[in-house]
Amino acid sequence: MIDFKNVSKVYDNGTKALQNINIHIDKGEFVFIVGASGAGKSTFIKLMMREEVPTNGTIVVNGINLNELKKRKIPYFRRNMGIVFQDFRLIPNMTVYDNIAFAMRVVGAKEKDIKKRVAYLINLVGLSAKVKCKPTELSGGEQQRVSLARALANNANIIIADEPTGNVDPQMSYEIVELLTRLNDAGTTVIMVTHAHDLVEKFDKRVIMLDGGEIVVDGNVQVSDLPVQSSSHLNVAKKEEIESKFTETPVAEESEDEALPEEKSDDDFLNAIIGDTESYRVYLEKDDAEGGDES
């Protein structure tokens, strides 16, 4: 499903981000990507999303050679991916429902299909009681669950989670990875960049560790062998406490709330939520300037 063959990436300033990377990820795998800051993790993700192109080597995702992918086809390629970010990137003037639904509206989905799919996803992430709330009314963990639901809106077969637990508390970190694991069990390929080594240890998945732009580990790894993590991340004692209390959130019955009004489609949206933080800020400023705030 995902193949990096002899891939190197050197930026214009001379930075060697990746050096001769060879990786094969099968459909349905769950892979943790770890490494110290500057190890090449962000570049690896950007190459997989076709936000960057390799200096050397070949990248194939879902049978598509990204080296040959024309720029106008990139948004269509990315529709098969669900991207989850550390900073959530939700549209602040939209409800939980509309943040998820908008990802389907911009690709032309029918409103009846949107209503059914969004209701399912809201139940899946346990936010039925928050359906009409806006992001500012949610906790960090709840916002991340909305972000995950949005990533699943268009039936993505690959989920790329870039530090999805970085801005949430320890209990929610565990629950988010547990949810990603359940999605993986159902056949979705999951690639998760993380510094939270307790999660890596607990969930016991394949680990690819980068160091200086090179792969130094691919497979099982001991936590003691991982690079030193920030003190802001989880610790084992806290994880054991959380695990003992963790229970799955029951799936609520689908509500019969009347359909919310359709938002204007905006082709910039998908590019904005999978671009860098700066491009997302520009998108929000543009939306505000055009009167996007309906309050």
Image (tube, grey):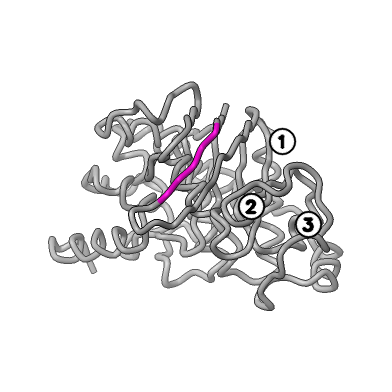
Instruction: Give amino acid for label 1.
Output: Asp
| Mark found first going from the N terminus, 1 or 2 | 1
Badge 3 density bin: few <14, some 14–19, many ≥20, Cα 10 Å: few
Marks 1, 2: nearer the viewer: 2
Give coordinates of residue 40: x percent, y percent: 54, 54
Local SS, label 1:
helix
Residue farthest to the bottom?
231
> Residue 9 in magenta?
yes
Marks 3, 1: nearer the viewer: 1
| Mark found first going from the N terminus, 3 or 1 | 1
Badge 2 density bin: few <14, some 14–19, many ≥20, Cα 10 Å: many
Instruction: Give amino acid for label 2.
Output: Leu
* Mark 3 and mark 1 residues within 8 Å of each other at the beta carbon: no
Asked if residue 171 can be seen in this view, the reply is: yes
Q: Return the mark for residue 185.
A: 1
Left or right, 3 with respect to 256, comes to right
Residue farthest to the front?
14
Instruction: Give whichever of 41, 119 is nearer the camera.
Output: 41
Q: Return the mark for residue 210.
A: 2
> Residue 224 in magenta?
no
Instruction: Give amino acid for label 3.
Output: Thr
Which residue is rendered at x = 63% and y = 56% of the image? 211
Name the residue tied to disc 3. 247
Marks 2, 3: nearer the viewer: 2
Give coordinates of residue 173: x percent, y percent: 67, 63
In space, the residues marked 2 and 3 are separated at their CA atoms by 34 Å
Give coordinates of residue 131: x percent, y percent: 46, 57
What residue range appears in magenta? 6-10
Left or right, 192 with respect to 240, comes to left
| Mark found first going from the N terminus, 2 or 3 | 2
In space, the residues marked 3 and 1 are separated at their CA atoms by 18 Å
